[in-house]
Image (spheres, rainbow, N blue to C red):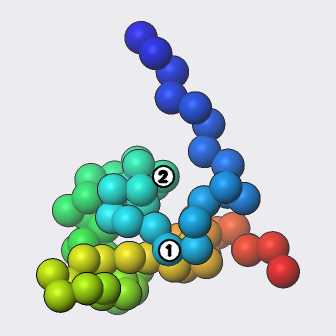
Amino acid sequence: MVAKPKIRIDDLPDLLTVREVSELLRVSPLTIKRWGKRGKLPAIRINSRGDRRYKKEAVLWLLGIQAKE
């Protein structure tokens, strides 16, 4: 079994995809989308398809981690 590299908060982009957030929080992508609909983790819609992106600060807040100033 190959171990995944550790995720470093400083290396995360400012906007995260559904998959990146789901891997970070260890929940399914569908859960992330549901949380967005309920307002628990607000999404930013981009492009004509309406792809979701999530602010890194919002994900860190959800984890109880304050972003560095």
Horizontal placement of 10 versus 44: left or right? right
Q: Which residue is mark 1?
A: 15
Q: Position of residue 39 (x, y in %)?
A: 34, 88
The quadrant holding residue 30 is bottom left
Check the image and report above or below for 25 versus 37.
above
Q: Quadrant of residue 32?
A: bottom left
Query: In front: 19, or 60?
Result: 19
Q: Is residue 46 left or right of residue 3?
A: left
Q: What is the residue that sits farthest to the right in this orientation?
A: 69
Q: Which mark is residue 24?
A: 2
Name the amino acid, label 1. Leu
Q: Nearer the viewer, mark 1 or mark 2?
A: 1
In screen coordinates, is 67 left or right of 15?
A: right
- Residue drawn at x 46%, y 15% is 2
Task: Find residue 3 and report its horizontal and vertical position in percent.
Answer: 51, 21
Q: Is residue 20 above or below residue 42?
A: above
Q: Nearer the viewer, residue 46 or 69?
A: 46
The label on residue 32 is none
**SS class of the residue under badge 1?**
strand
Percent x, y for residue 50? 20, 84
In the rendered view of the protein, which quadrant contains the N terminus?
top left
